[in-house]
Image (cartoon, coloured by chain):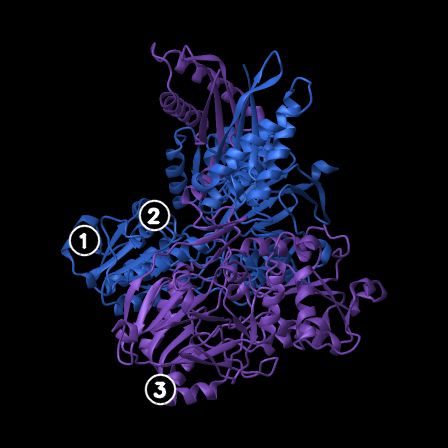
Chain colours: A blue, B purple
Amino acid sequence: MAKQKLRIIPLGGLGEIGKNMMAIEFANDIIIIDAGLMFPEEDMLGVDLVIPNISYLLERREKLRGIIITHGHEDHIGALPYILPQLDVPVYGAKLTKGLISAKLKEHRYSKKATLRTIQPGVKFTLGNFKIEPFSVCHSIPDGMGLIIYTPMGLVVHSGDFKIDYTPVDGKPTELAKLAQLGAQGVLLLLADSTYAELPGYTPSETVVGEALERIIAEAPGRVIITTFASLISRIQQVINAAAKHNRNVFVIGRSMKDTTRIASELGYLNSPPGVLRRFDEIGRFPHNKIVLLTTGSQGEPTSALVRIANRDNSQVKIIPGDTVVMSATPVPGNEALVNRTIDNLFRQGAHVVYERLAQVHVHGHGSQEELKLLLSLVKPKFFVPIHGEYRHLSLHARLAKALGMPETNVFVMENGAILELDREKGKIAGRLPTGNVYVDGLVMGDLASVILRDRKLLSRDGIVVVIIAIDKDAGKIVGRPDIVSRGFVDMKEGESILEQGRDLVKTTLDHSGGRPLEWSFINTKVKDTLSKFFYEQTRRRPMIITTVVEV
Amino acid sequence: MAKQKLRIIPLGGLGEIGKNMMAIEFANDIIIIDAGLMFPEEDMLGVDLVIPNISYLLERREKLRGIIITHGHEDHIGALPYILPQLDVPVYGAKLTKGLISAKLKEHRYSKKATLRTIQPGVKFTLGNFKIEPFSVCHSIPDGMGLIIYTPMGLVVHSGDFKIDYTPVDGKPTELAKLAQLGAQGVLLLLADSTYAELPGYTPSETVVGEALERIIAEAPGRVIITTFASLISRIQQVINAAAKHNRNVFVIGRSMKDTTRIASELGYLNSPPGVLRRFDEIGRFPHNKIVLLTTGSQGEPTSALVRIANRDNSQVKIIPGDTVVMSATPVPGNEALVNRTIDNLFRQGAHVVYERLAQVHVHGHGSQEELKLLLSLVKPKFFVPIHGEYRHLSLHARLAKALGMPETNVFVMENGAILELDREKGKIAGRLPTGNVYVDGLVMGDLASVILRDRKLLSRDGIVVVIIAIDKDAGKIVGRPDIVSRGFVDMKEGESILEQGRDLVKTTLDHSGGRPLEWSFINTKVKDTLSKFFYEQTRRRPMIITTVVEV
């Protein structure tokens, strides 16, 4: 009976990086894990954000018991402001996670309506048929959690985003012993992070970066300007520690960096010895070799503080020779060109720039192959679904599981919208939801018609030509000379004669089109064909052509 | 006296990757080294190619003695079809380089007019005041050459694109002994490749890849499909060797791969044991474990054979489980997303995919830091200019030279258009040419007006709205209801009411604009302001708005 099966439904984060979301359903209960956003890919022109498709959840609103957030990164919390107003269920997260969600909902003016509940590692809570016990995992933000979910069919373990760091900065390593105990009890299903399934070996400990930063700060002749992800609190802590050790003061610039250092300090996740972290307006009192500047801009974001500095466009900070800039981050896929441009411009200004290729000033927050194998070996699940990653990451993670002896039939490489049904013995893909991206573009949220994206792409390539034709309503004849306006096609100087010839061509074509009165569809086809051909011959470009007819 | 100085003028390839070109001038002679193209960056919407700005050369046409091409890659030869018709000078290149240039000029129907001359390592030739002696360097295409240029001021060494490989596939290592002899004689200036100045250590030998490919071919249960750069002849040779050793046959698909294997075979740069390289139409005769397919698509090019195969869109080859696909190349910056998508789709089809992150199936063709240091140490130049690379690569290369003891004042980090003047004792930057990219966009070649690129960018973001207003010529009053057409802004369904409201808004605004007859500039400003505001409120999007007035 289908009702007695456990359903696992990834709604985001599989076959892509970002907008992580998963539904777990049994009988009359559904719990949701994470609600993230994804930044648009290159071909999603003009789109602001992409969020998971929640139609499955909207159709089963009465079953929803809550959303559990594993940690406070955008790709796990970013969709909340868009979906909470539709779903209206309680949200569960650890202390810092909750703080970041609150700040985000406040920006969207939804904080008062939301129900946020705090959860802690080792403290179980019940949502309908499910009992959930969070456990600590290391990741590139504090309070990262995995979830042990007690279901009527057996134990499900969700890894969250994790790596194994035996010496994490916040002293909270991934709870391996607990996972080993679970493995001994018997785990039905493991859902585990695949983001770095391509990388052999182990991901280095965050403390490795601390050592590199300290060496740089100790040896720098002048100011040290450090950028990292604003949410990488442990990195910020290490910068503060290294600065304190070498008698430097830390100044923070950039809005998101200021916001998260404030939230993290208030909640006790960031500790600065007295006098180290200072207000920016005091910076003039200190010599350059006593200064560490912590800034936004690690992704080359065009309006960030560091990019403005690199472009000599920041009124407060100008690069001078002797400055050292540390890019303590890795470019997120798609941001490589922006980051490289920023590094180039900093070198142009005379700074010495240290980045990941030159020194170990960053480690990532996900487990590499040996860590993934360790998790699989400890948990020893009956079934395994690799989550969080592009299709290749999922495939390679599945390959690792099979190499460890898991039977082929118990490993499921899924994609968003697939429905896995499990009982204690067997699992199978039982169906597939209609998928499709939900785009946030301005105020509109939905499956942005593909025709809009296609048009934007066409427009971006060779621009647009608009032809305005006046037609005598009664005679069905063209009146006067057609007008042509263009954008992004040819420049005014060299293009003028081409456009003028185009006007004549339209006029001649329509004048000599037989005696019948002109009809819209005829005009439209005729004008487009004639002009496309003419423009292509003249310029080898294919602008979009729009014909409008004014009846006079 | 300025006339007695040697001028070094980079015209491309500095502060960027691609379109390499350099002029060396003394008294009445100018020689040009390389004439490459660059593929457009992300923000150069609709641009086909970018080539060097040659106005300096056009103004000194009578001084030009020839263009020497160091090797046959696009970023060194690709601009020839565009600049040769303007410059009309002889082109010098090694045998394979000349073959590739001929093929390229033939495509552009310019091969008959061009004068191509063959040069060889160790064989000097004279161009005006300059005597030139090419020497062999290893790179990712055969016939790579560096240049020793005997000038009235002293010896100039140009590295070309190079790495140091003691066991190259074609048996022609970089001529280190010759470089050491030059160093002993005294070298005025070294111009050296900086592309991989970020990477510590040594670049591995091409033979390392051969071993990896052989292991994969030996162990694969079914077909092996290998993609690489079509110009990477040594890689193709290694694929043929490994296939032959394991009794497999090699089939080539994809136009550029077929073309270069043909040219390279004809010129003797590619050797296949009899019966190994076969016509594609014979493939049906062989079992899967006897097949190696060599294909284009290493950069995820949308129309390439491999991408069609990955999309199940190739009529000749469909992926089946058991197939192994080897990406024996690295994504060129900017192509990462396309390559990743291709790998994902191949995994989806059931192939096992091997790529650089998983195994050493590619090595790059440029020297890493230890090789750059070796070159500097052997040549011991008085002056040094790092060439070929983004600004950070040039800066880091300069840093290496200073670490080896070169005085700061003798190392010049230059950018395109800077003019370095040297005599035997001193060097200085004596001027700067006006720079600016030369874009090839369709048939037009020139500094594509920045307004075109800006418009294309705006269009790509939120689309366009065209407003057509009919005005009574005599009364100066609006006639009827304005028309609105949009593309890429809102979709027809949800957007219709917004556009309809926009029409009414324009009508109301213009009807209530006082008694004066309507003027074009007033209409234009008023309509744009009103609609921009309205559309932004309704959608949070800012489409480009064009107003056209038809007088009736």
Label 1: which residue?
A283
- Is B179 on the left or on the right of B332, as rendered? left
Marks 1 and 3: in contact by CB < 8 Å?
A: no
Q: Is residue A447 in view? A: no
Between tags 3 and 1, which lies in front?
A: 3
Q: Position of residue B530 (x, y in %)?
A: 39, 22
Element carrying mark 2: loop
What is the number of the mark on residue B186? 3
For residue A304, which numbered disc appears in the image?
2
To which chain does the residue with label 3 belong?
B
Residue B186 sits above or below residue A2 on the image: below
Residue at the extreme front: B62
- Same chain under badges 2 and 1? The reply is yes
Q: Is residue A351 left or right of residue A116?
A: left
Query: Which mark is on residue B395?
Result: none
Identity of the residue drawn at 53% across and 63% down: B80
Please state which amino acid type lies under the numbered disc 1: Ile
Type of amino acid at the residue the image marks with label 3: Gly
B198 or B143, nearer to the observer: B143
For marks 2 and 1 on the same chain, the one whose residue lies earlier in the sequence: 1
Marks 2, 3: nearer the viewer: 3
Q: How far apart are labels 2 and 1 at the CA level?
A: 20 Å
Report how far apart the C-alphas of labels 3 and 1 lie in the structure.
Answer: 50 Å
